[in-house]
Image (tube, rainbow, N blue to C red):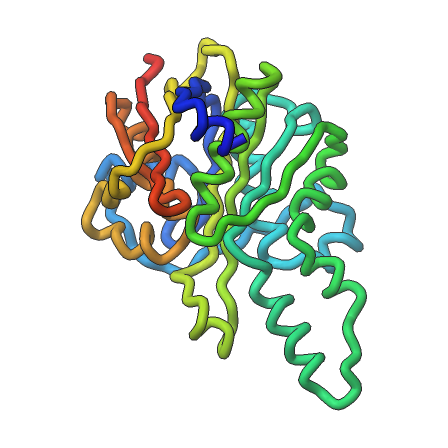
Amino acid sequence: MAQQMENSAAQTTVYLLGIGAIGPGFDGWPALRAILREEEAWSRTTTRIPVLQVLPAAERRRVGIVVKLALAVGLEAARHADRDPALLASVFSASNAEGENCHALCDALAGDDRFISPTRFHNSVHNASSGYWSIATGCMAPSTSLCAFDASFSAGLLEAAMQVAGNGEDCLLVVHDSIYPHPLGSVRPMLDNMGIGLVLSAQPAAHALARLDLSLSENPPTLAPLEKLAALQGGTPSGRALPLLHAVATARHASVDLEYLAPLSLRIGVSPCH
């Protein structure tokens, strides 16, 4: 879909209905919105992963950080958008595998018996979050899982927007990152665990937050809206969303360029709906 957009030099328009956000120093979109509006100072505290009650007890014991993070921001975005999560098509985008499981599997393979835990293995696959989302919400709508390294937010947003534009149905985007323990963490450093959820629609609902006009450009990425947030933008692929979220939080017209697949950027024209 991104290739189609590139070839046609087209612009795609969608409407943002709801946001979910969890990361270092904020436990939800209201907290991040206050930081972006400079109503609250950002303190780089460790990301707190919420306890979820939407999964059966047996599943809650098995899932790792990535799944908990993905479900939390997805559910927050759906509530904010006043949408039933069981009816939403979804796109899950992550820059890498779940760090803890990947580390544990590598550790087991380096041991003498090389025994791999079946639970860890099925939680390590890239579409684990999508699978647990369907278990937690009962959702049977189509779901896509993808990965684009540091461009994972833009790639996920572009995929979700093109699906909305193509079929006219609302779509949930969940972008989530997980830190790797040492030694993998020294090769793929990550500031902290972080997740962003967005609900997109083809129609300007009464409570829509903003109109988003998406196109591809070769402009350099827009810098973090606040200097103190530069580490968060550069330290997590989900943090690449901050210039967009700043424009939405402050309800202003803006044009931002987000990191995509070089030499391209994803240009987003942001227009408040209220």
Position in image of residue 103 (x %, y %)? 60, 72
Residue name at image x 52 percent, y 19 percent = 201
| Residue 161 to residue 55: above or below | above
Please indicate whether residue 250 sits to the left or right of residue 130 in the image: left
Please indicate whether residue 138 sits to the left or right of residue 67 in the image: right
Which of the 4 image quadrants contains residue 137? Answer: top right
- What is the tally of numbered marks visible in this picture? 0
Residue name at image x 47 percent, y 71 percent = 185
Please indicate whether residue 22 sits to the left or right of residue 35 in the image: right
Is residue 34 visible in this depiction of the protein? no
Q: Residue furthest left?
A: 227
Quadrant for the N terminus, please. top right
| Residue 234 to residue 139: above or below | below
Given residues 215 and 134, the one toward you in this image is 215
Residue name at image x 49 percent, y 63 percent = 179
| Residue 189 to residue 79: above or below | below
Quadrant for the C terminus, please. top left
Position in image of residue 177 (x %, y %)? 50, 54
Given residues 205 and 266, the one toward you in this image is 266
Position in image of residue 38 (x %, y %)? 22, 39
Q: Residue furthest bottom?
A: 112
Residue name at image x 57 percent, y 37 percent = 74
